[in-house]
Image (tube, rainbow, N blue to C red):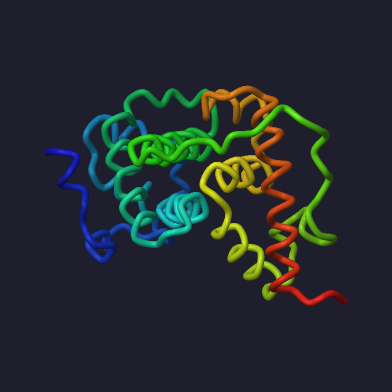
Amino acid sequence: MTPESILLPRSAFGHVTATETEKTQVTDYALAQAAAAGDMPAFEALYERHHRRVYSLCLRMTGNTAEAEDLAQEAFIQLYRKIGSFRGESAFTTWLHRLTVNQVLMHFRKRGVRMEQTTDDGDVPVQVVKGTENPASMPVVDRIALDKAISQLPPGYRTVFILHDIEGHEHEEIARLLGCSVGTSKSQLHKARMKLRGLLRQQIPPQ
């Protein structure tokens, strides 16, 4: 079986549902071990559990639905190829998250997307606009505005903002992922927040 053979429509995985896997309380680690041993239904169960999260991350980082769909598929192809290397030393979701981020960053490099030129300047402000420091708790209308504003950021700014403010990575880890300095990561985040401030002011009227 080749990795490409896992590119099936979502309905093809109908015989393995999230409800069924929850009922059996099979852990991600157990499914990963089974998938590594060639158990395709176990891999399909992992897909059902995590494909929405993977697609959502790809969409936030690219701001493009078509690219996000392709990258989510590519992420699961890489998962299929590399699942035997998962040792359970971290949560499976963390491991898959890193794999997905690396897949998107590789896509950016192939496209020639470069980090915007920045300097290692200044402290990073605490938040962009009052209420946006925790996007998950924002009102729906404001969250939609924030997502729209994020999609309008230059790729380098958007990547750092998502990795830090939304995904919770520290600057040291972002620097390793992106191959830049910690200062550049901080500067990118600062500039992303400043640009977001202007974009949000255009979309959300002052209260």
The answer to whether 186 appears left or right of 113 in the picture is right
User: Residue reaching furthest right?
Assistant: 207
The answer to whether 57 appears left or right of 3 in the picture is right
Residue lying at 58% horizontally and 54% vertically, measured from the top left: 153
* Residue 60, x across and y down, in percent: 52, 54
Task: Identify which residue, 101 or 195, lies in the foreground.
Answer: 195
Quarter of the figure that contains the N terminus: top left
Tally of numbered tags: 0
Quarter of the figure that contains the C terminus: bottom right
Residue lying at 57% horizontally and 48% vertically, measured from the top left: 158
Residue 66 falls in image quadrant:
bottom left
* Residue 140, x across and y down, in percent: 68, 73
* Residue 32, x across and y down, in percent: 37, 35
Q: Relative to 189, does residue 145 appear above or below in the rendering?
A: below
* Residue 102, x across and y down, in percent: 43, 34
Task: Identify which residue, 25 or 123, lies in the foreground.
Answer: 123
The answer to whether 168 appears left or right of 21 in the picture is right
Residue lying at 69% horizontally and 29% vertically, measured from the top left: 119
Q: Relative to 89, does residue 191 appear above or below in the rendering?
A: below
The answer to whether 183 appears left or right of 55 in the picture is right
Task: Identify which residue, 157 or 11, lies in the foreground.
Answer: 157
Residue lying at 31% horizontally and 57% vertically, measured from the top left: 16
Q: Relative to 107, does residue 53 appear above or below in the rendering?
A: below
Residue 10 falls in image quadrant:
bottom left
